[in-house]
Image: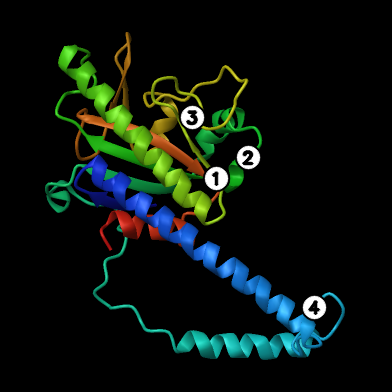
Amino acid sequence: QVSAYCSNIRQLTSRLRVLSVNQTAERAVLEPVQKDIGNESIALGGNKQFPFPGNVSSQIAYKNISAESENVGSMQPKKDVAEKQPVSELKAGDVGEKTIELKAVNCPDSMKKKVGELFPNQNVDTLSVLNVTQKTKNDMSAWNANMEIEWMAVSSGFVDSAIAACNALKSFGYWADFIDPSSGRPYLSKSNSDVTLNVTDDEYRSLGFDITDMGCCKILAHKIWGKMVFVGTIFTNAPVDSPAVNAILERVNGE
């Protein structure tokens, strides 16, 4: 699992939107160029590296291409050693004034049955979970007028950030959706199932949260911020160690 932190939900949403726009623009530029290169090779009598019908290469030609790619890659500028990297876990003192945590983990086995019913068209064994945790001013386990007002605000902020995150993941070519905090059901996908996923369900223990059963209700607590949190959950088939998830975490960290 890896985590990233930022100051507020608007900052998170803004950074994710920028990433989505940049990635979409980059793909829009690259795809026509790649198509033109393919057409050009046909017009010029074929690509010598792919001499057979259908631009198929022999094993020898493939080895030469790999060598060229390796040489080109070695010329790329190296990242600064001091560059920030997503962290595995932080303590309260490390977080400082940051109020947003984005944590990426592989979908736990204990969640797969319910997630499979929520997203029947997805292979749950390949899914990752991105949890957005917002530090709140009110104790979210004690329902009152102030808590209700804040819950509505932070849930709306989460929906905006989750849409931005899903768009960013889709710009990399992955599927993504999130749980509607008001219903516990998929927000983007159509689901005929009556199954819901709520943050106080036992499945959230496997995501690193404490769930306490009070008899009349269940209470969720965060390792750092306790019960003063709002949690939203995103699912994607992008691996945790994929360039897409890494780009999101780096962007959230402000890189």
How far apart are the two marked residues, 1 and 2, measured between alpha carbons? 8 Å
Locate residue 122, reporting x and y percent. Answer: 63, 40
Three-letter residue code for mark 1: Leu
How far apart are the two marked residues, 3 and 1, measured between alpha carbons? 17 Å
Q: Which label belongs to residue 55?
A: 4
Between 40 and 112, the one lying in front of the other is 40
Secondary structure of residue under mark 1: loop
**Which of label 4 and label 3 is nearer to you?**
4
How far apart are the two marked residues, 2 and 3, measured between alpha carbons? 15 Å
* Mark 4 vs 3, N-terminal side: 4
How crowded pointer 3 is (Cα within 10 Å; few <14, some 14-19, many 20+) is rated as some
Three-letter residue code for mark 2: Gln
Locate residue 133, reporting x and y percent. Answer: 29, 38
How crowded pointer 1 is (Cα within 10 Å; few <14, some 14-19, many 20+) is rated as many
In the rendered structure, the answer to whether residue 32 lies left or right of residue 220 reads right
In the rendered structure, the answer to whether residue 191 lies left or right of residue 236 reads right
**Which of label 4 and label 2 is nearer to you?**
4
